Image (cartoon, coloured by chain):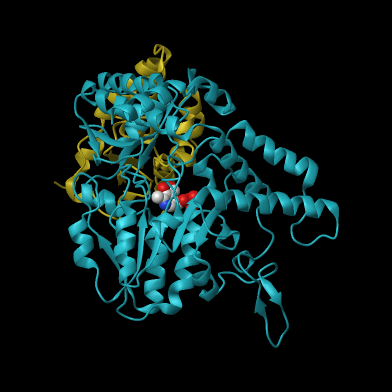
Amino acid sequence: MTASKEDFLNNPLGTKTTLEDVLDAFEFLDDWEERYAYIIDLGKQLPAFPDDARTEENYVHGCQSQVWLIHHYDEASGKLYLLIDSDAMIVRGLAAIILVALNGKSPRELLTTDIDELFEQLDLFRHISPTRGNGLRAMVGKIRDLAAAEASGV
Amino acid sequence: MTDLSVANSASAAAFDVEAVRRDFPILSQQVNGKPLVYLDNGASAQKPVAVLDAMDRYYREMHSNVHRGAHTLGDRATAAFEGARETVRQFLNAGSTREIIWTRGTTEAINVVANGLAPRLNAGDEILVSHMEHHANIVPWQMVAERTGAKVVPIQVTPEGELDLDSFNSLLNDRTRILAITHVSNVLGTINPVAPLIAQAKKRGILTLVDGAQAVPHFQPDVQALGCDFYVFSSHKLFGPTGIGVLYGKAQLLEEMPPYQGGGEMIERVSFERTTWNVLPYKFEAGTPAIAEAVGLGAAIDYLNSLDRGAMESAEKALLERANQLVETVPGMEIIGTAANQVPVMSFKIAGLHPSDIGTLLDQQGIAIRTGHHCAMPLMDFYGVPGTARASFAFYNTLDEVDKLFTGLQKIQRLFA
Ligand SMILES: Cc1ncc(COP(=O)(O)O)c(C=O)c1O
């Protein structure tokens, strides 16, 4: 299976499921169990990832779980679309939150989004810290690099 | 036999874990709003007040450089430092303090030995390790092999996580020069039968190193009884400070080995024409050593000596037994490493869950375990897993904490259901 343009555009995260949805939902989650149940559910919204895209080039070097990331830049709308895959459920859920914040945005918009602040707000900041070794930091770095490359027209 | 089991259960009752826990201030805190359950002792163990106090007192009352000063503080520091060396000698039952070298830890100790034995290796020579080694007992040998043309050959492991003795026997040959093997596996908890392996190696003139990093927190080795040429361990896993470890080596071999690093302290005389090495153990201790850490390690061993080690071992056995009994309460949970002879270390996987999911969600409940490859990638490959979750217990853990681990795992499973 190879990713088509539609696969990217149909990703609900950041389009149908918005950052407001996630922030609203978090308001009502009382304890860690509810929060993580929700995060795991969000992870289930990650669209299927094309098998042939699980390549070294698309691999995000984290520490423990395996993470892959691919992108499509839509010339017509000037927006950057992303797909992410991981074999760990919580990393998938956290990746979904990242996508909700960053997917389908223009590179410029994307570069001005403060992910750390978002994770702080959701009380998930420790997950994004470099010491966790879950690859989230690397994932965000890779997305920003892609955006910077598109923004500068490389 | 009956007498023995009575004695065992009596000493298990005598072991007052709550009193022992009060000696470890870090244990009585909340993490993520829950009482800390620290089950990552295999990565690094916590320190008793006795260690903290010894280091504090050292800096307050006796610090200065060792072996140099013509003054009282220098004498005090040297006495404390060399006293710790004697404590370690007794702990290992080594013949002489000349055979106790301070290093930064297990890793550095193995590097010192690998480097020191390199001149004896020729192309085609073989260094026998096992498939369950920590990277610290693989990579230094690979680096030396690269330099010398020698080969690193792994002894196979059985599916239960024991050394495959047939594999060991078939791999021993006339090219084997070194046997470097772990006493206890950091992933599986397996206690390897190192003594007979060493005996067999010795008959063929093979040099032997035992990685004791995961053994010493659970039982006391006797290097003379084992007959090994080298035995290495890290202080921080033995309830002592980080930054220091021990290389025990037979004096004659240490004499023959070249030094690892050059500098101050390790020389007898330096001139631009000719520099000569200091005597053992100083020949391998270039530069100002980790003095307070050595003193701290000595205090950790003194502390352990003050406890009833037999009672401690029975208490640890009880922890592992309880954990094994509870495995069936978590559907899909599978233990990796079911050797007959184990320290209380439990690696596991749970169907459908990534180890990192397990680690993250236990942390939410105040339970600290380690997840990942545990610096033993060849072993992960052998079991066909990207990593495992590992709970590693120490004598200060309680049966209640074992129960909390399993309640925690059940909760996690419900979350994914
Ligand atoms: C069996 C074994 N060997 C060696 C090491 C390395 O110890 P250190 O990092 O203290 O040098 C470890 C630590 O995890 C270990 O478990």
Q: Is residue B407 above or below residue B144?
A: above
Q: Nearer the viewer, residue B311 or B397?
A: B311
Image quadrant holding the C terminus of chain A, namely bottom left
Residue B361, x across and y down, in percent: 37, 26
Horizontally, residue A41 falls left or right of residue B41, namely left
The chain letter of the cyan chain reads B
Residue A60, x across and y down, in percent: 35, 48
Horizontally, residue B37 falls left or right of residue A87, namely right
Based on the displayed image, in which of its 4 quarters is residue B363 positioned? top left
Horizontally, residue B200 falls left or right of residue A148, namely left
Residue found farthest to the left: A1
The chain letter of the yellow chain reads A
Residue B18, x across and y down, in percent: 51, 20
Residue A20: in sight, yes or no? no
Q: Nearer the viewer, residue B99 or A134?
A: B99
Q: Nearer the viewer, residue A113 or B10?
A: B10
Residue B38: in sight, yes or no? yes
Q: Nearer the viewer, residue A47 or B400?
A: B400
